[in-house]
Image: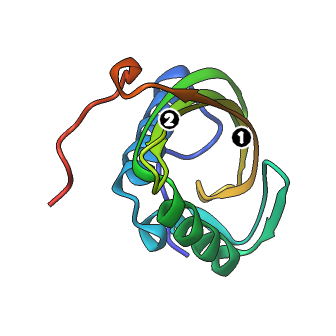
Amino acid sequence: MNPRPPLPPFTEETARQKVQAAEDAWNSRDPERVSLAYTEETEWRNRTEFLHGRAQVVEFLRRKWSRELDYRLRKTLWAFTGNRIAVRFEYEFHDDSGQWYRAHGNENWEFDELGYMKRRYASINDQPIAEAERKFRWERPH
């Protein structure tokens, strides 16, 4: 696999770049694109699901974005050291009934020497919101 910069050990600048790249990829809602940031044998905990490998990540993201409609995410660097980054995030989506939600959470990331994420542990809480309470508005992707 080719290196995926920025590479660890992270500085504040390179950690912020990694966080922004993750935000951009997730906001594409393209499971294959997102999965390319992870090692082939990546390990995830997402709420109550435990995933192993890119194929499971792609399937998980397909299911996620089929339920979480008009998904929009913001990530913020919380801490970093060596090959690890911690982020805080919020995202908004609505379900097929039109109910909007804001999800709040934290992620802990661990990277390999080539800059691919080998571990992602996410803790997430959802909050129902009214459409008027939305923070993140955007144009639909083309």
Asked if 20 appears above or below 104 in the picture, the reply is below
Q: Position of residue 74 (x, y in %)?
A: 45, 31
SS at mark 2?
strand
Name the residue rendered at 45%, 57% in the picture. 96
Name the residue rendered at 61%, 76% in the picture. 59
Name the residue rendered at 47%, 51% in the picture. 5
Q: Nearer the viewer, residue 127 or 142?
A: 127
Q: Nearer the viewer, residue 117 or 57?
A: 57
Circle 2 or circle 1, nearest the eye: 2
Label ID, residue 83? 1
- Circle 2/circle 1 CB separation < 8 Å: no
Q: Is residue 39 visible?
A: yes
Q: How many marks?
A: 2
Q: Residue furthest bottom?
A: 55
Q: Position of residue 1 (x, y in %)?
A: 55, 76
Q: Amino acid at mark 2?
A: Tyr
Q: Is residue 3 visible?
A: no
> Which one is earlier in the sequence, the residue at label 2 or at label 1?
1
Q: Nearer the viewer, residue 3 or 124?
A: 124
Q: Position of residue 138 (x, y in %)?
A: 22, 36
Label ID, residue 91? 2
Name the residue rendered at 65%, 37% in the picture. 9
Q: Is residue 132 left or right of residue 34?
A: left
